[in-house]
Image (spheres, rainbow, N blue to C red):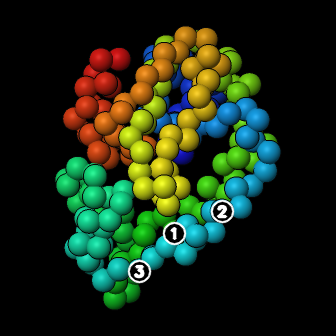
Amino acid sequence: MGGHSVTLSAALRPASFASLLLLDPVIRSKNEYVGPWTQAQYVAKRRNRWTSPQEMYERFESRQPFDAWDRNVLRDYCDYGLLPDGAGFVLACPPEIEAGIYENSPAPESNIYPEIESIQIPVQIVRAGKKLDPANFMAQSPTAPGLAASFQRATDFADTDHSHFIPMEAPALTAKWIAAL
């Protein structure tokens, strides 16, 4: 929910931002903010307990979407995304919290289009174009097709080489885009 959160922050605290780079943000079309996403419960069932960060790394390194992630990013995710818990480790963001975020993302109160219209700084939207396995809920970009038109000064382009997880798959490219702003 990074793109959604930073967009809302830029609207609420405009002096804090000079520009925005939104990498495949989960900002839906205006008409999709109608109620909870009822398919989020599978996220709550994610594995939460690990014996070590290495066990998590070995489990994820050959599975979608993690198999496309930069190996150093995946290593950091496993090393720093877990918290010690007794004899093992648990995810820093518990699955039930993550499921709640997904479930509430299309709620009417999550619609930030009125705030988007107030943003006056330049906005660059990068939409993921690479398709994942259709069984993956992030198989295609969750970004509203006409999102750029809702901002006062936005451009939009597709990155056909990467999935929704652009920063994890291409950290050097992400850093280049940030530096260009």
- Numbered disc 2: secondary structure: loop
Residue at horizontal 23 percent and vertical 72 percent from the top: 58
Q: Which residue is mark 2?
A: 39
Of residues 55 and 85, the one nearer the viewer is 55
Residue at horizontal 63 percent and vertical 62 percent from the top: 40
The mark nearer the N terminus, 3 or 1, is 3
Quarter residue 157 falls in? top left
Of residues 148 and 75, the one nearer the viewer is 148
Residue 49, numbered label: 3
Q: Answer with left or right where residue 176 lies relative to residue 35.
A: left
Residue 94, numbered label: 1
The mark nearer the N terminus, 2 or 3, is 2
- Numbered disc 1: secondary structure: loop
Crowding at dot 3, Cα within 10 Å, few <14 / some 14-19 / many 20+, comes out as some
Quarter residue 150 falls in? top right
Amino acid at the residue labelled 1: Pro
